[in-house]
């Protein structure tokens, strides 16, 4: 690649990062019915997707220290959003799982994100929506590379 191409790609990368960051920030702001911290919502999402997990596995998955994860799980447990349950094969371990209230928070969170995004997309003109739809596979490819 030429220096000019490198600079051009750097500008695209910067603009792309800024745009994606703004959308994600708005999604988080518009869709946090319980005003939970991002790390707490991440744990609820992880448990919803992966099922019950122990503290160490959750910490690894969320890229944090087990002690920090323990604090998050403690607060979520106190709020009634997660519960402890015994490990099916290792009695020394405790697993954390979503409660019905935790699952309801995730359901509400997803609906609020979707509703905000639908309203935002409705403000676009048809050509803008078509351009966005055409870009989705490319954005997905960038995310998976």
Image (tube, rainbow, N blue to C red):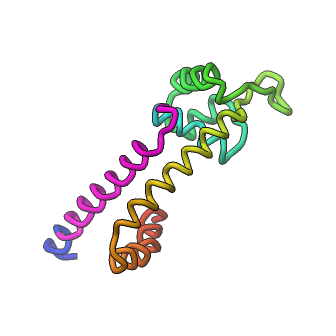
Q: Identify which residue is drawn at 19% across, 64% down.
A: 11
Residue 110 rendering spot, x and y as whole percentages: 56, 49
Q: Is residue 109 left or right of residue 53?
A: left
Is the magenta region chiefly helix, strand or loop? Answer: helix
Q: Position of residue 144 (x, y in %)?
A: 49, 64
Q: Nearer the viewer, residue 2 or 108?
A: 108
Residue at position x 46%, y 61% in the image = 118
| Residue 126 pos. (x, y %) | 37, 78
Start and end of the magenta stretch? 8-36
Indicate the quadrant containing the N terminus: top left, top right, bottom left or bottom right. bottom left
Q: Closer to the camera, 118 or 29?
A: 118
> Left or right: 9 with respect to 127?
left
Most distant residue in the left direction: 4
**Furthest-right residue in this view:** 89
Residue 120, how many percent across, how many down?
A: 38, 60
Which residue does the image show at 67% across and 40% down from the upper left? 103
The answer to whether residue 109 is above or below residue 137 is: above
Magenta span has 134? no
Q: How many marks?
A: 0
Q: Is residue 29 above or below residue 24?
A: above
Asked if 133 appears above or below 118 in the picture, the reply is below
Question: Does 19 lie within the magenta span?
Answer: yes
Which quadrant of the rendered structure holds the C terminus? bottom left
Residue drawn at point x = 42 percent, y = 49 percent: 27
- Relative to 53, is 31 on the left or the right? left
């Amino acid at each position: 690649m030429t220096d000019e191409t490198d600079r051009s790609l750097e500008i695209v990368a910067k603009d792309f990062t800024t745009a994606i960051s703004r959308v994600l920030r708005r999604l988080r702001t518009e869709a946090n019915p319980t005003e939970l911290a991002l790390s707490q919502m991440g744990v609820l999402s992880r448990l919803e997707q992966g099922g019950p997990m122990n503290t160490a596995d959750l910490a690894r998955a969320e890229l944090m220290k087990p002690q920090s994860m323990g604090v998050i799980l403690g607060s979520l447990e106190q709020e009634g959003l997660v519960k402890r349950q015994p490990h099916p094969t290792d009695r020394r371990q405790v697993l954390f799982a979503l409660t019905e209230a935790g699952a309801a928070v995730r359901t509400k969170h997803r609906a609020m994100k979707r509703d905000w995004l639908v309203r935002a997309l409705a403000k676009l003109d048809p050509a803008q929506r078509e351009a966005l739809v055409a870009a989705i596979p490319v954005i997905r490819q960038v995310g998976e590379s």
